Amino acid sequence: MKIGIALALTVVLASCEGRQSVLSPAGRDAEVLANLFWWMLGGAVVLWLFVNGLMLYFSRIRRKRHSLRVAQWFIFMCGVVLPTTVLAGLLIFALREMPQQREPGEGLTLRVTGESWWWRVEYWPDGADEPVTTANEIRLPAGSRSEIELAANGVIHSFWIPALGGKTDMIPGRVNRMSLEPTAPGTYRGQCAEFCGLSHAHMALEAVVMAPEEFERWLGAEARDARAPEGAEAKRGKQLFLSQGCGGCHTVRGTPATARVGPDLTHLGGRKSLAAGMLPMDRQSLVGWLSAPESIKPGVNMPGYDHLPPADLQALAAYLEGLT
Amino acid sequence: MTDSSLHDPPRSAAELDERQPQGQWPPSEEMLAEPVPSDIQEASKERLRAAWKTPTGIRYLSAVNNSVIGKWYSLTAFGFMLAAGVLALLMRVQLAVPENDFLSSDRFNQFFTMHGSAMMFLFAVPMFEAISILLLPAMLGSRDMPFPRLSAYGYWCFLIGGVFVLGSVLFDAAPSSGWFMYPPLATEDEGVGSDIWLLGLSFIEIASIAAAVELIVGVIKCRPPGMRINLMPLYGWYVLVVGGMILFAFPPLIAGDLLFELERSLNWPFFDPERGGDPLLWQHLFWIFGHPEVYIIFLPSIAIASMVVPTAAGRPIVGYSWIVLSAVGTGFISFGLWVHHMFTTGLPAISLGFFSAASEAVVIPTGVQIFAFIATLMVGRVTVILPTLWIAGAVAIFTAGGLTGVMVALAPFDWQVHDTYFIVAHLHYTLFGGMVFPIIGGIYYFYPFITKKKMSERLGRWSFWVTFIGFNVCFLPMHLTGLLGMPRRVWTYPGDLGWDWLNMISTVGSFVIAAGILIFAWDLLRPKGRQTLTERNPWNAGTLEWSHDVPTEAWGARSVPFVTSRYPLWDQPEIVERMDAGRFYLGDAPEGRRETLITSAVDAIPQLVVRVTGPAWCTLVAAAFTGGAFILPTFGIYGPAIVCGVLAIATVIWWLWTATAIIPDKVMKDVGLGLTLPTYVSGPKAPGWWAIFITMLGDATAFAGLIFGVFFFWTARPDFPPDGAAHASAALTTTAGVLLAGTWLSTWFARGLHRAGHVTIARALLIAAPIMASGGAASLIGAVWFPGLQPATHAYPAMMCALVVWSVAHILCGAIMQGYCLARSLAGRMLPEFDADLWNTTLYWHFQGVSGIVTSLMIGLVPRVM
């Protein structure tokens, strides 16, 4: 019996690990809230046993009548005094914690815009005039608090990376703000938390927390124009990219493609995933996505290119994969 | 004897004003102890039976009696619950394994939208109203609800609307933006789904409000003589609190629905940020409704528990006044919590702090109610009966949901778990524990009252344990699923995040719940023809409903008792015998009519005996036409919809004309025990006046919702009103204000002069009043029309025009009422001494006069000052 419980507990605790888990925090805010949860869980279990134990005791076990006076004191103590004390303590803790989790950032500002169904991401380092634009992946320096501005295009979304902190909605016509203070480098997963239509389930993002100097290096590279294609296939892919009208929606900096309807693809190959966290970043996924995006993301705005010969799709994928 | 002391009709209004209850009050013990001869008993039973006979054959559908309507209503709501449950099972199949394609994304979205909407609007709220319609008159020893035809109309609206909304799932046309319908997703939704939600559910909301009005009037005015408000069964208090909450919670949603539908059908941009709108306005209006809704669902269950627990403990409830205060407190606080559904929308910290504290505060009254039940068990000697098992299960589940509620009420913690499966678990714990289990417990408890048969003890235990275990298997793991990061409302999920096995467990659990509910449904519906009738009061309860005996008698209480205790069946030993003998009030129906007693609001002193309406088709016809008026516009069929609307109004007028405020043959009537009561009263003593008053409070709340919208935009948007915007014409809004004040005063004076006998002047005023009202309506339209306010261009002109739409519709309704009074007067159906119609119309205009003038100021003056 005891072994069984121990085993079950191990399984449950082991399952708290995860790239998208509130219970395996990698940021200051998430850590405070995870600890808060464990405390509250303990308290809740005690109170639950107390209330239901009393119920059982008085209805099944102790059949002797108590006096009315005792009962009235009981209502007052358990119904008024006990909750008032417990709740006041909890509230004081939570209300003091709230502003700390919304402290302004210490330098870097990210502007993330919710689109259907992907994330437009702009980095504004302290004092920058123009942003470094990317999509579907955010990178943050560990050990400092970054400011995050949230906007939306079309419908409401919600920005949430459980391992780093709580969520904030992205609302059309408004700019919301929040901040995150990651502590442990690593790759975490975030997901849209406000129902946003057909592909709400398919709107995830990767959050990469990096050591500060590594982050600076990465941001410097990300700010540069796209790398030129290498090899015949990739070069042909670039021509196809331009001739098939991909530039009507996408930007690849350093090429004639400058539209901002869809995600910026300048460093697509350098990202960890494709299609907002849906597919691994590799040749096969790229071909699959290009030929039938609708089958991966219902309702997506991007048209499918399955009318192109397989060789062309391979060439396009080679070009995109090379955009590191 | 009952026929002996009728008075001649009085000749003047002055004499009428002095018409008061006469005779003995309160009854003396000697009068109560005097036996009724058995031949008189039999003869009066015969007459009562004839008056209250439920129609048979196809005419059964025209029945209006509360016992029939209540049964239909609750069975229909139960049916909708089963349908919504099937949708949940299909969703659980889809989520059983990752990357599943059992349902498409669109289908899944339709299913979760309908599951939530149906459980909320077609099950939880109507179920409370249905059960209350069924039980309340019996608990109050009353014959029927005060307005039986209104119950019937409400039921038919509910049935038509519910079938329409839920049926859309079968045609792949259901709404798919979630039960909360957030714009812009829902406003930009292509197809008719959102319109079905808006129009279909608005229709049902109106039926819900109608039932709430009736229940409130029932509690305030239909208590038995002597049942002062502090002697009322707790159930009655909960009906009062919940009815009041429905009255103030639903109207903001109706105002929101109006704006929403105007945006969808006419492109008025209330929620479109590109044109000065704001999606958050909807969220506020929705949750001002949506949070009280949670308590509207939960409190009735406490009400049921408050009837079951004293019976199980074999003694009166401990802390009656604590419970009443807590119920009222919960009702009030629940209106101050709505923002906790919006903690992640980026509102300022000060609002979050306030609403966080309020959300925690509501725990206290809730806790007091639960601890009062435990205290009752402490003090009493507990007999374990099957219903208590369900109530205990409810407490176990609900306290768990309440404790997670304490967690999510803390704004920072909510930032993590909001919109995850943690919330799905939390809300199902509160709703199963706070609604489903107590209701089923209540059905086991009250079943013998309704049918005089008992449900099976064995099946009841089986269904309890299967449902209870299934519930925890399904929903307990969801807390962890949510903490591991799984958002709500996703139709599928990847397999590598640790969510797969948790979801599989939940799916298995959901089918176990279904099995438990099916056992219950079988036990409820299986034929019990051969089973012998149960004894009269099988649980040995103390409240009046258990005085009912033979189920085929539709008269409710055989005679309306004189009550001096909270638990009359325990404390007034002869009460049942005397009720049976017809010793108390209204033990006979000498004119062969349905009647019930009206008593004063606080002390329950008898004031009036009113005639209650009997079976009629007009309710069904009116509901069908009302349905047409709401349902046809969904498909863009506007012409026939308008025809339906006009026919619905005509039917309602016919219904009122033929059945309400009828001038009685005899002005005073002997009701028994030496008491003589008037048979016709107008003004604040009349139940109809109260119904109008309560309805108008709800209506004024909806209007306040629109005004809230104006001020919301003003504070939230810098471009409201936009620079250089065209404003409504000052001259015409002033004219409108003056004309509306004029029509209001004319109606008011008409009432006074009419009562004083100046019928001709009153009629002249009643001719002038609708003309002024129409002029006022036309001026309001002109005020926005001539300066060229284009509602499709910006939220500012849209909001102004929405106020005009609201007001014009109300003014026209008021004009019809004025015309109705004039027609009644001309037809000799309204006389100076019998003027209830005019009192009610005047009351309507007290509200409408004020809101019309406020509208004029809001569109003509306020924007110029902003």
Image (spheres, coloured by chain):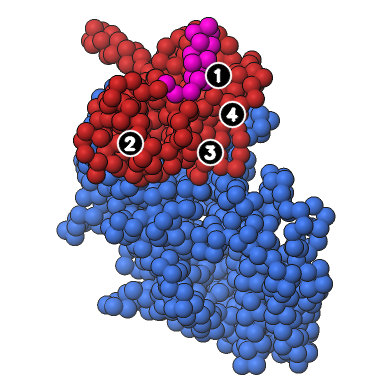
Chain colours: A red, B blue
Residue at the spot 44% in from the left edge and 78% down from the top edge? B640
Q: Is residue B609 magenta?
A: no
Q: Earlier in the sequence, mark 2 or mark 1?
A: 1
Magenta segment, which residues?
A212-227
In this view, the mark in front (1 or 4): 4
Residue at the spot 45% in from the left edge and 31% down from the top edge? A255
Binning the other alpha carbons within 10 Å of mark 2 as few (below 14), some (14 to 19) or many (20 upward) gives: some
Residue A16 lies left or right of residue A51; in this view the side is left
Q: Main secondary structure of the magenta part?
A: helix
Where is mark 1, residue-wise? A180
Q: Earlier in the sequence, mark 4 or mark 2?
A: 4
Chain label for disc 4: A
Q: Which mark is residue A240?
A: 2
Q: Earlier in the sequence, mark 2 or mark 3?
A: 3
Disc 1 residue type (three-letter): Leu
* Dots 2 and 3 on the same chain: yes
Q: CA distance from mark 4 to mark 2?
A: 36 Å
Where is mark 4, residue-wise? A149
Q: Do the residues under discs 2 and 1 have CB atoms within 8 angstroms?
A: no
Q: Position of residue B265 (x, y in %)?
A: 51, 64
